Amino acid sequence: MERKRILILDANTLIDYLECDRTIIKLICRYVGQIYLATPVLNEINEIDEDGCIEIGIKLLGPELEQVMSAAARKGPLSFQDNLCLILAKEHGLTCVTNDKALRRACELQGVPLIWGIELICILVESGGLPVKHAQNIILTIQRNNPKYITDSIVKSAFKRLGITV
């Protein structure tokens, strides 16, 4: 059996899941790995609060002052929150779950493991935590809610991985 991953989500991926089906997060924590969220990222999300995170299994990760200062000082395409996600992932050995191309590039350059947001749904199915039909509905709902980032090719790739024919 594959060992469980330790995951950190960016805001957009978490919002995709929250707007679709909060129980997915509980299932990911149970079957795939623990989800962490940087407290400054929580502050930019309206869909959930600290109690809600605890309720669905997300562990909050408060950055240290040096990490905050480092994230704030960085220039480039990443937001403060994305820089913080990258720093925390690198320093704590976390896998970053994001659809953000700039954050993905930065993670790749720093050797931080990555998972696409929709890919995590596929991993959940493969881990026995979600039926394929439910995954199909979730993926389509996420795409409907976020068509700019969850393109038809991403959906087709996920469906192919899961053996779904449309």
Image (cartoon, grey):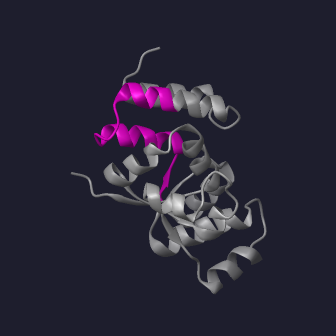
Residue 103 drawn at (x, y percent)? 64, 56
Is 126 magenta? The answer is yes
Residue 102 drawn at (x, y percent)? 68, 54
Q: Quadrant of residue 127?
A: top left
Q: Residue at x 32, y 57 (%)?
A: 4
Name the residue at the top extreme. Answer: 166
Q: Residue at x 59, y 66 (%)?
A: 86
Front-most of residues 54 and 122: 54
Q: How many marks?
A: 0
Q: What kind of secondary structure does the magenta stretch mostly adopt? A: helix
Residue 1 against residue 19 in the figure, above or below: below
Is 117 magenta? The answer is yes
Residue 160 drawn at (x, y percent)? 43, 25
- What range of the chain is rendered magenta? 112-138
Front-most of residues 113 and 47: 47
Residue 77 seen in this snapshot: yes
Residue 68 drawn at (x, y percent)? 67, 79
Horizontally, residue 140 falls left or right of residue 101, namely left
Residue 58 seen in this snapshot: no
Q: Residue at x 61, y 31 (%)?
A: 143
Q: Residue at x 68, y 54 (%)?
A: 46
Name the residue at the bottom extreme. Answer: 66
Q: Quadrant of residue 163?
A: top left
Residue 127 against residue 156 in the figure, above or below: below
Residue 144 against residue 37 in the figure, above or below: above
Horizontally, residue 127 falls left or right of residue 153, namely left
Q: Quadrant of residue 65?
A: bottom right
Name the residue at the left extreme. Answer: 1
